[in-house]
Image (cartoon, rainbow, N blue to C red):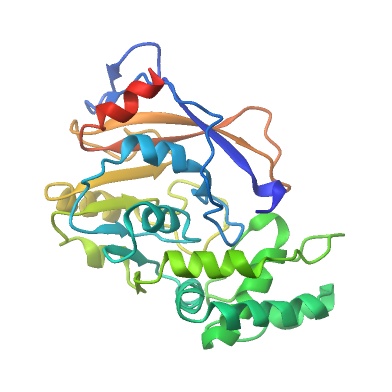
Amino acid sequence: MDSKDNQKEMIDPMIKNVKRTKMGVTLMKQCFDVGKQHKVPLKIIPYVGCKSGFAHIFDSLIPDNCGKKIYDVFGGGGGFTFYACDRFGSKNIVYNDHNPVIVNFMKSLKKSPDELFEQYQKHYKKSSSDYYLDVRDRDLEDGVVGAGRFFYLAKNAFSGKIRFNSKNRFNCPMRKNTKCPQIKKDTVQFLSNTIKHLKITNKDFKNYDDVKDGFVYLDPPYMNNTNGHYNAIVDLTDFVDFLKSTQKHNKIMISEQNHPDYLMLSSMYKVFKITLNRSMQYFTQKDKSMEIVAINYDPPKANLMNYV
């Protein structure tokens, strides 16, 4: 992992006692161990908003029998997908992202880990600011060759920003005064094996509004956020309509920065606040940043008892 992307999370009380928001959503009082770390590095690229550090939170809030399939609808850098495959096995996990560049990378990691590693090594040996700009102008969707280019760009992009313009061209500048980071072949092979049977799709999230009897994880990009780190801003109305369709027949978990009332969550949801301690080059925080995790089911009591 890149040390500047490391983040620690904790779930702490939204308020002093369990209460409800204006929409009737339950705000939970629950304390979690912030020091617990997962046994393996379930991350391959730096990614703003990556949930690789949420493993202990997922361990506590996701039941063992969570559904027939698990859907990571806004897959991004794959933090949740790697976690779910590691815990449940990859046969019943679905990773989805709307961006064909990122989907191509995940497919290449799954099918061709050794070649992906070799492609990265070629870029590593040639790395410079001019070389970075040259690679940025090339095709990033061209199988494992394109995936290797994206891998190189993602590992060297300024402060972990995976940013594309309206034409889906990667447009983040290179990190300044730093060397191209090395990667371990064993890590690439391990993560490839972790997602060995993973189903990978490149669809609009609304295409998953008819799934049933599953666990649907939703980490939408930047609703009500002006930071252009990602080339997709999810329309709030579309997201709310999607929730109305899926929450009736599935267990839902939502990770978001906005208050639950902004998301118009129904009274079936329980919301936990997460305090993030981030050390990222692009962003200086005077105060800790906050996110929420909302679920529409009862969390497993056996797990929560360890944190009361």
Q: Residue furthest right?
A: 177
Residue 144: where, in percent of width, then height? 55, 84
**Residue 87 in view, yes or no:** yes
| Above or below 105: residue 186 | above
Q: Residue furthest top?
A: 16
| Above or below 276: residue 141 | below
From the viewer's perspective, tell me whether residue 194 is left or right of residue 157.
Answer: left
Q: Nearer the viewer, residue 248 or 42?
A: 42
**Residue 171 in view, yes or no:** no
Determine the residue positioned at 30% across, 41% down. 62
> Quadrant location of the C terminus?
top left
**Which of the 4 quarters of the picture holds residue 150?**
bottom right
**Which of the 4 quarters of the picture holds residue 145?**
bottom right
Residue 300: where, in percent of width, then height? 25, 32
Determine the residue positioned at 69% across, 45% down. 280
> Quadrant location of the N terminus?
bottom right
Determine the residue positioned at 36% across, 65% down. 95
Residue 101: where, in percent of width, then height? 51, 76
Q: How many marks?
A: 0
Q: Nearer the viewer, residue 25 or 178?
A: 178
| Above or below 23: residue 84 | below
**Which of the 4 quarters of the picture holds residue 96?**
bottom left
